[in-house]
Image (cartoon, helix red, strand yellow):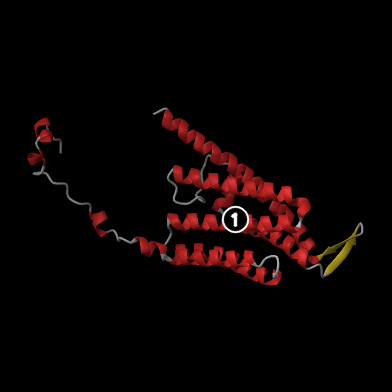
């Protein structure tokens, strides 16, 4: 209905034409803050945080127990996403919790490796910076443009990055390969056996061999991190330029 100037200036006349509440909003189920915090995927996320924190506290003294706890936390990473989709409990907080847990877990593991392999401390530090910065920019740019999940595809992004985030098989293989590379390096430091062969006087254990198998996937993940950093930075700048030109 078109409201005349007289009606616009007269609130009594406006009340003669009340806006009926939307049926969609009326039937929409409401939740409380506590309910969202207690979503099953988020509870799984809290368990991951606890397992990771305990594992890092014992990493240098109890390597076998560390491996068990860290592996449990890593496996739960797949469970929270499955629970969110199955129970229709996807949430922005859950996505952020998942991202933060992944990042601090990898960062702490790299910190431990830099302590064990002191000659490679600078390399592990740079890997840590790349991982944190690229994922933080990715999350920030996703939230800025209104995405509910940092894993949503963007047609303007490089095709390899879109494939990584939209194909669960590729995502799983890359994440597993990258994580196992770090874990096998950790295991190789504490457990030198079983030895497989000798190369130029250096005894190659099973764990070093497995880390070598995972290395191409690990390297590919770092390439994706660089691409992710560039695409996310470009999204932020493009969004800012658009806002300034409005």
Closest to the observer, 87 or 198: 198
Residue drawn at the location 51% of the way across and 48% of the way down: 139
At mark 1, the secondary structure is helix
Q: Can residue 88 be seen in this view?
A: no
Q: Looking at the figure, which quarter contains the C terminus?
A: top left
Q: Looking at the figure, which quarter contains the N terminus?
A: top left
Furthest residue in direction top, as rendered: 245
The total number of labels drawn is 1
* Direction from residue 118 to residue 128 in the image, left or right: left
Q: How crowded is mark 1: few (under 14 residues within 10 Å), some or many (20 or more)?
A: some
Percent position of residue 24, x then y: 26, 55
Percent position of residue 111, x then y: 67, 55
Residue 58 found in image quarter: bottom right
> Which residue is label 1 attached to?
171
Closest to the observer, 118 or 64: 118
Compared to residue 112, the image places residue 128 above or below, namely above
Q: Is residue 125 visible?
A: yes
Residue 105 found in image quarter: bottom right
Compared to residue 152, the image places residue 183 above or below, namely below
Percent position of residue 207, x then y: 77, 64
* Direction from residue 102 to residue 87 in the image, left or right: left
Residue drawn at the location 54% of the way across and 44% of the way down: 137
Percent position of residue 12, x then y: 7, 41
Residue 244 found in image quarter: top left
* Direction from residue 161 to residue 87 in the image, left or right: left
Closest to the observer, 111 or 45: 111
Residue drawn at the location 67% of the way across and 65% of the way down: 59
């Amino acid at each position: 209905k078109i409201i005349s100037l007289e009606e616009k200036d007269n609130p009594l006349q406006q009340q003669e034409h009340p806006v009926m509440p939307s049926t969609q909003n009326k039937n929409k189920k409401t939740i409380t803050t506590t309910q969202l915090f207690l979503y099953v995927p988020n509870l799984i996320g809290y368990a991951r945080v606890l397992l990771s924190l305990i594992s890092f506290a014992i990493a240098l003294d109890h390597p076998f127990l560390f491996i068990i706890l860290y592996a449990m936390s890593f496996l739960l990473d797949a469970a929270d996403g499955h629970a969110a989709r199955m129970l229709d409990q996807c949430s922005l907080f859950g996505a952020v919790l998942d991202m933060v847990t992944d990042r601090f877990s990898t960062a702490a593991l790299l910190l431990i490796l830099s302590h064990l392999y002191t000659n490679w401390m600078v390399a592990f530090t740079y890997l840590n910076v790349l991982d944190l910065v690229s994922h933080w920019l990715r999350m920030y740019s996703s939230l800025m443009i209104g995405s509910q999940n940092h894993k949503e595809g963007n047609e303007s992004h490089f095709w390899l990055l879109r494939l990584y985030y939209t194909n669960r098989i590729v995502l799983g293989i890359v994440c597993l390969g990258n994580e196992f590379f770090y874990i096998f390096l950790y295991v190789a430091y504490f457990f030198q056996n079983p030895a497989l062969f000798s190369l130029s006087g250096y005894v190659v254990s099973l764990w070093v061999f497995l880390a070598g198998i995972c290395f191409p996937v690990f390297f590919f993940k770092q390439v994706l991190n660089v691409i992710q950093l560039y695409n996310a930075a470009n999204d932020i700048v493009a969004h800012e330029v658009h806002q300034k030109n409005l």
